[in-house]
Image (spheres, helix red, strand yellow):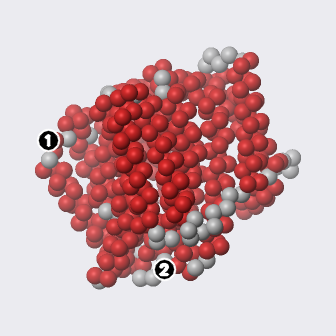
Amino acid sequence: MYFAHTVGAGVLGGYFLFMAYFGIINLVSDGGFGGAAIKRISEGEEQDAYFSAFFALRSFFVTVVIVALLAFREDFVDLNNAGVFNWLLVALIGSLVYGAVNIAIAGRGKIGIQATCGFFTEITRIIVQVTAVFFGYGVAGLAGGFVAGMIVVSIIELRFFDLHLVRFGWRHIKSLSTFSFWLFLTSSGVMVYSYADTVMIGYYMSNPDVGVYRVVLQFTSIAALATTSLQVTLWPKVSRWGKTGEIIQIEKSLSRAITYALLLATPLCIGSVLLGDKLLYYFYGADFAKGYPVLVVLFIVQIINVFQFFFLTYLGAMDMQKNAFKVTSVATTANIVLNAVLIPLIGITGAAIATFVTLSLNALLARRVLARTLTIALEHESLLNILKATVVMGLFVGGYRMVVPIENVWMALVPLVLGAGMYGVLMLRFDRKIYEELKGIMMQMNVVWPKWI
């Protein structure tokens, strides 16, 4: 929000293009071996050898990619003009250490440590970026803050790193390669429809349009916080359960994960649809208010994302990456075509619609494949309770919006806070299972549970 008001959509657009390039190039340099290393390490056999093989492969690919970038530097006109090409190289070098340590910790199942360090990554990034922008460094300051976050957290995570570099054999590389090949192809597809819209908006339109679209996308991603957190936690567990044949555990975890992800995503979707135009205007500025139609579509996308994200996660964790690639390849092709058609016609809203169609198709195809192995049963009672609480909250927020004029950011926050509180209380009243689970978690953390709930 600070950056939007301080540097505007144009500078943010340049930063988001930097992030898009980094994401795509980092995927190429990883080659899917990162996910493969998590998979093999989580299985508990020859962990040091698999980590060592991964680190050697990753180092080789990063070196090759950096050399290629330097050789073709003049072709990256937009990055050179923005002054972030060198930061891209530094980011790739930083990702070598950060990625290796982070993957080792994830494979070892130390999710609490990984999550805490992820929090420190964001805090460090924000502090450095805000400071850099304050002193006038613009897009270079934003890119530098991103790199600083990786470096600082790499140092912290090394304290909890307990694997060792050892001699490894060809069979370790072959084992990683077998899994990583399909994972790389699947990840490539996901990366394409994650960043194709950004790159194509930059091609057909302008950097300010990229800035508006990515800010709105980032704003809606708050609805995916539970989804991504659960995915990080569940991947090594599902991998282990798949190895030991505990299918019932996998089925139960999938149903419960979808419920808890929708517990957050559903009310955020409705609340932001009702208040989104005012939130964008007061949080980010008048330039971003035109992104409201995009916000509505992308919040609906986050509901669909819960299903497609978990379905693909479980396919990968259960060693069915080839099937995940087949699903993703169809959706990726559709995404590119739709972006190419819709962005020139209706601008950034077209990119949002393309994402909606893509993820819907991905979710349907992934569910069809996963259902051949698992019984996918949704928790209908809990989902109905989520819907009831959301409707009551929506009626309250909508009524507030009709009666009270929202003329500043504080008036926009009042229904947001009250609606969130109402929804939380209603859910705890409606759903005893969620009530008991959350109460147990709070008590384990020595947090006093209110008796009035």
Q: x%, y% of residue 17?
A: 32, 39
Q: What element carries label 1?
A: helix
Residue type at the position of mark 2: Gly
Q: Is residue 75 left or right of residue 325?
A: left
- Quarter holding residue 241: bottom right
Q: At x 53% / y 23%, what residue is drawn?
A: 281
- Quarter holding residue 133: top left
Q: Earlier in the sequence, mark 1 or mark 2?
A: 2
76 relative to 180, above or below: above
298 relative to 41, above or below: above
- In depth, the one of 372 and 339 nearer the eye is 372
Identify residue for label 1. Answer: 74
Residue type at the position of mark 1: Glu
Q: Is mark 2 on a helix, strand or loop?
A: loop
Q: x%, y% of residue 308?
A: 53, 54
- In depth, the one of 382 and 132 nearer the eye is 382
Q: Is residue 415 left or right of residue 97?
A: right
- Quarter holding residue 65: bottom left
Q: x%, y% of residue 68?
A: 17, 54
Q: At x 21% / y 33%, what residue is drawn?
A: 81
Q: Is residue 236 left or right of residue 57?
A: right
Say if mark 1 contacts mark 2, CB within 8 Å.
no
Identify residue for label 2. Answer: 44
Q: Residue 4 carries which label?
A: none
Q: At x 20% / y 55%, what residue is drawn?
A: 66
Q: At x 25% / y 34%, what residue is drawn?
A: 82
